[in-house]
């Protein structure tokens, strides 16, 4: 599991020439055909010469990498913030309020959550086109904000909270907004942390949505451009990959305890 991360980091410290010589599969296949031997990739973990030139190209010399990185941050941050807020409010309604058709509506949410992206691709594209959102970040952000996964996960947490807490607060004169803000939210903080981590991993690595909804290359997230970087310059591709995975690793390290507790608590009551 750790080997790809280690290889990406160590190879990002190599020079472009060394990376090219190690992973020039076409050249090695040609030489192997001429010599009658098998071709192989020279997988190295320790660079001959440590070089930071690849990081200089990613962070300073080539501004497009930082531009695409901030595109990723912008879209993912808005999606996470929006889905946490919308999902928490909807989850409270499904878990603690009683209204006609509640269970049937939540069943529809489950069906929507289980649908793969490819099934809803055409309807989403048509809606974005009718609203004039194509080739803009809103075509990705708005469907992400109203995703069903956050509603499902936070509802599972709220179901584990005894209804007696809500009923006692309601009898004391507290309204639903106060109950939600002062009782529910403090009790489901691990759920928020787990949801943020899972959403971040999902949308930080998105590829299909930007390729379909965004035509302008400068509006794409870095996740889409990484494949192009690998083809143009393998050494820079390793450095860009390390730079790209760093926020994900830091987020998981920071929220590890909350994430584990949140995943465990999400299955307490269905």
Image (cartoon, rainbow, N blue to C red):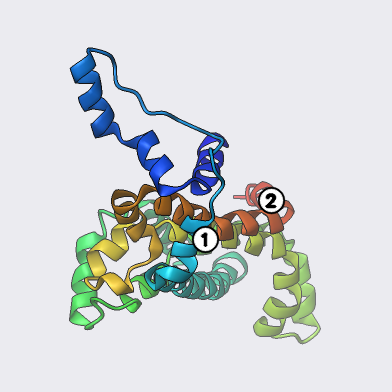
Where is residue 47? Give x, y as percent.
54, 39
Left or right: 128 as drawn, with respect to 11: left
**Which picture quadrant has residue 94?**
bottom right
Q: Residues within 10 Å of mark 1 (few under 14, many from 20)?
A: many
Which of the pair 240/221 is nearer the observer? 240
**Of the two numbered discs 1 and 2 in the rendering, the one whose residue sits closer to the viewer:** 1
Whole-number angstrom distance, CA of label 1 to CA of label 2: 20 Å
* The N terminus: image quadrant: top right
Query: Which residue lies under the disc numbered 1?
Result: 200
Q: Give the quadrant of residue 67.
A: bottom left
For residue 208, side relative to residue 70 (left or right): left
Residue 124 seen from this side? no
Q: Can residue 123 be seen at all in this image of the molecule?
A: yes
Residue at the spot 78% in from the left edge and 69% down from the top edge: 165
Residue 23: x and y in percent read 36, 36
Secondary structure found at label 1: helix
Q: Residue at x 51, y 64 (%)?
A: 151
Q: Is residue 166 above or below residue 162?
A: below
Any mark on residue 265, and which? 2
State which tag comes first along the sequence, 1 or 2. 1
Q: Nearer the viewer, residue 239 or 115?
A: 239
Q: Nearer the viewer, residue 41 or 79?
A: 41
Name the foreground residue: 174 vs 171.
174
Q: Tag 2, which secondary structure?
A: helix
Q: Are marks 1 and 2 in contact (CB under 8 Å)?
A: no
* Residue plotted at (24% across, 24% down): 31
Left or right: 150 with respect to 189?
Answer: left
Q: Give the side of residue 165 with respect to residue 234, left or right.
A: right
């Amino acid at each position: 599991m750790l080997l790809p991360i280690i290889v990406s980091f160590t190879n990002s410290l190599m020079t472009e020439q060394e990376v090219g010589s190690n992973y020039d599969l076409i050249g090695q296949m040609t030489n192997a055909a001429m010599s009658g031997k098998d071709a192989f990739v020279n997988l190295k973990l320790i660079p001959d010469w440590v070089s930071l030139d690849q990081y200089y190209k990613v962070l300073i010399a080539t501004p497009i990498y930082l531009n695409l990185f901030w595109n990723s941050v912008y879209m993912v941050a808005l999606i996470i913030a929006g889905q946490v807020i919308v999902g928490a409010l909807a989850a409270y309604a499904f878990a603690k309020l009683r209204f006609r058709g509640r269970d049937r509506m939540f069943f529809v949410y489950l069906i929507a959550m289980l649908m793969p992206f490819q099934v809803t691709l055409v309807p989403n594209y048509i809606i974005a086109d009718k609203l004039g959102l194509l080739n803009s970040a809103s075509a990705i952000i708005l469907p992400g904000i109203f995703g069903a996964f956050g509603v499902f996960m936070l509802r599972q947490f709220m179901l584990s909270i005894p209804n007696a807490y809500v009923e006692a607060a309601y009898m004391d004169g507290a309204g639903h907004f106060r109950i939600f803000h002062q009782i529910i939210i403090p009790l489901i903080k691990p759920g928020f942390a787990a949801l943020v981590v899972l959403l971040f991993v999902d949308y930080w690595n998105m590829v299909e949505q930007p390729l379909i909804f965004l035509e302008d290359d400068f509006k794409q997230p870095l996740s889409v451009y990484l494949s192009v970087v690998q083809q143009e310059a393998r050494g820079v591709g390793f450095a860009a990959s390390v730079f790209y995975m760093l926020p994900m690793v830091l987020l998981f390290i920071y929220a590890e305890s909350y994430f584990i507790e949140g995943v465990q608590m999400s299955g307490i009551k269905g």
